[in-house]
Image (tube, rainbow, N blue to C red):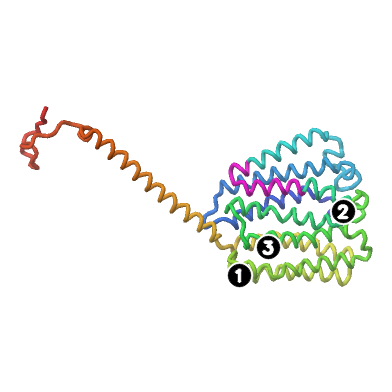
Amino acid sequence: MTEDIISNIDPTFVFSALVVATSGAGYVLGSGNIVDIAGLCCTCAGTMMVAASANTLNQVFEIKNDAKMKRTMRRPLPSGRISPAHAAMWATSVGVAGTALLAWKANGLAAGLAASNLVLYAFVYTPLKQIHPVNTWVGAIVGAIPPLLGWAAASTELSLNAMILPAALYYWQIPHFMALAYLCRNDYLAGGYRMFSFADPTGKRTAWVSLRNCLYMLPLGLFAYNWGLTSEWFSFEASLLTLGLTIGSLSFVLKPSPKTARRMFYGSLLYLPAFMAGLLLHRLPNEQKAHNLAEKSELDGVLYGADLQDKERATQKRQDRNPSSMQSRPPVAYASVAPFPFLPVPIYDS
């Protein structure tokens, strides 16, 4: 029953939700004291459009494979509800539109990351799934780029502390997909995919790979604190979260079975949202972003002052060329300029 539920999870939906959520988290982490809500919405919208394009191209290239798998045979393309040409046109248009939106509302760096990730997912990772088990590690790179995209959209640059969430995503995806491939190996085998678990009938190697990547995640909370990304509380919370996932992978190592693999899989589903929530809750404003904003404000002030000086010089030159322009009215008679209310109204010279 549980395996049927897991096998019915559509990976494209999970991928799209993961991409949008992590890019939004990256945008918030890369922001200064104030988060630009409009910029955040535009970044998430552009990222969602590019992810939709990548997913559609993936399904165009894998129609025959999807038709052989239980969890994908009811998709629009293998079921015949949508033609491949229509899907390809949709993917191209929405991918270009999403990249253009990121370039317009964010910056070229974010748009470049989105476009490169689309190419990596659709034209490298997708065909590699039918060639070599290394596809899992390439797919982990694809999943690690969206938070970098969000960070770049917010701060216009990438720094060392921008790598915390991408690193967590990269290492998290390995045990997550190792457990999924182990539980759904028959479905993947029917679809013609090359997974690491196929050459590991006992599950021992699959479990060890999962445990190794969980151990890589243990110091990430401490790095986040030392690099000024979060407060010290996050280092403690992240260590506890990773320790729980590590225990799950260790049980998979000690006794490889569908039960322990399922436990590790569900643990990975709980780990990622909790890790990102901790990052956002304990985040510290991006100092580089705040510094850039301060420099921009200072530069704008200098330019504004220079512009005022230029206007004053231009006004002074006009006055020097035409002194009569300084007087909007004829000069007031000397005898009438006295600060007393009982004197007559000033008389102007003609």
CA separation in Å, label 3 and label 2: 28 Å
Location of mark 2 (residue): 4
Mark 2 or 1 closer to N-term?
2
Percent of width and height locating residue 40: 59, 49
Location of mark 1 (residue): 226
Badge nearest the viewer, 3 or 1 = 1
Residue 1 visible to an observer of this rendering: no
Label drawn at residue 287: none
Q: Quadrant of the N terminus?
A: bottom right
CA separation in Å, label 2 and label 1: 43 Å
Task: Judge the density around disc 2: few (<14), some (14-19), many (≥20) Cα neighbours within 10 Å.
Answer: few
Percent of width and height locating residue 174: 79, 61
Q: Amino acid at mark 1?
A: Asn
Task: Judge the density around disc 1: few (<14), some (14-19), many (≥20) Cα neighbours within 10 Å.
Answer: some
Q: Is residue 300 above or below residue 225?
A: above
Q: Is residue 190 above or below residue 262?
A: above
**Over which residues does the magenta segment extend?**
101-120
Q: Is residue 133 above or below residue 219?
A: above
- Residue situated furthest top in the rendering: 350
Number of dots carrying numbers: 3
Percent of width and height locating residue 147: 66, 55
Q: Residue at x 87, y 43 (%)?
A: 73
Q: Secondary structure at mark 2?
A: helix
Q: Residue at x 88, y 56 (%)?
A: 195
Does the magenta run of residues contain 112? Answer: yes
